[in-house]
Image: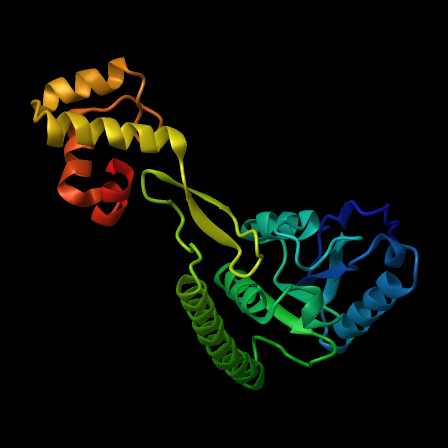
Amino acid sequence: MMHVVGSAAASRRPRAGAGSPRAVSHLRVSTGGQVDSTSIDTQREQCQALARRHGLVLVGEYVDAGVSGAAASRPALDELLAAAPAGEVEVVLVAKLDRLGRSLLHLLGLIEQLTVLGLRVISASEGIDTKTPPGRMMLQLLGAFAEFERERLRERSRDGAYRRVLAGGFVGSSPPFGYRPVPDRCGAVGVVLDIDPTQAACIRAMYRLLVQDRVPLMRAITDLNSAGHRSASGKPWTKHTLSRWVRGDGPTIAARTSFAA
């Protein structure tokens, strides 16, 4: 019996086996409190019984102890995926599919990754075997539900963004030059745009140079940089960046007008 330490991942590397297909089990518990409970042992017993039922040689196990299924990286699972291309094992056993994937979308992606690596996945609780026609049919059904959920998530995301925009919120990744994203004081829309004083001063200087004084572009660039004004990236203005902004690739006309007033 393997000893599992704390919340760190522990694994038993595959050992040589002959004859029957070689399998490894993947076991996981979400919290540190479960590490010392019977959960790991129960999963291990289920995988051992599964191996016997399918005539498999269980040559090792990979254990993520106290690691949430929502974690982006699970060390033992990562180790299993890294070892798979070596051809040391042919089957991955799990007590339950949710021990393997943190969500339906993640689970299907992971099973597909294992399948591409030539591994068969068998689940004790759900009775899914990716080698059999019923198992593949079940995965196809799960895939249809996953695609439906993906579309639902996209729709909810779009609807939420649209409502925030109508309420005056900001939903983009990069604010237009002259503005900065700040938390909404009312807490209704999350983030709103506020005037950035430094960039606003730069826009006023641009308006004075290019519109009021009508100086050539290269001289305007020299004057802006000499005065310490910088582009959105924080770098000195160049012919490319300033001409882009003048052509309308920067803030909206309304924004420029408000700053220049």
37 horizontally vs 26: left or right: right
Residue drawn 73% across the image and 76% down it:
124
Specify whether residue 236 is in view: yes
The tally of labels here is: 0
Query: In the rendered view, would you say 114 is above or below 134?
Result: above
* Way the structure is coloured: rainbow
Quarter of the image for residue 214 reads top left
Query: In the rendered view, would you say 130 is above or below 109?
Result: below
Tell me the quarter of the image containing the C terminus: top left
Q: Which residue lies most toward the top here?
A: 226
Tell me the quarter of the image containing the N terminus: bottom right
Give percent across and percent down for residue 209: 15, 25
Give percent across and percent down for residue 61: 75, 56
Residue drawn 54% across the image and 68% down it:
105
Q: Which residue lies most toward the right here?
A: 37
Work out whether residue 231 or residue 84 is closer to the camera in this orientation and state it. Answer: 231
Work out whether residue 170 or residue 133 is closer to the camera in this orientation and state it. Answer: 170
Quarter of the image for residue 212 reads top left
Specify whether residue 19 is in view: no
Work out whether residue 169 or residue 17 is closer to the camera in this orientation and state it. Answer: 169
Give percent across and percent down for residue 54: 71, 76
117 horizontally vs 175: left or right: right
Residue drawn 24% across the image and 24% down it:
237
23 horizontally vs 144: left or right: right
Give percent across and percent down for residue 35: 87, 55
Residue drawn 82% across the image and 56% down it:
31
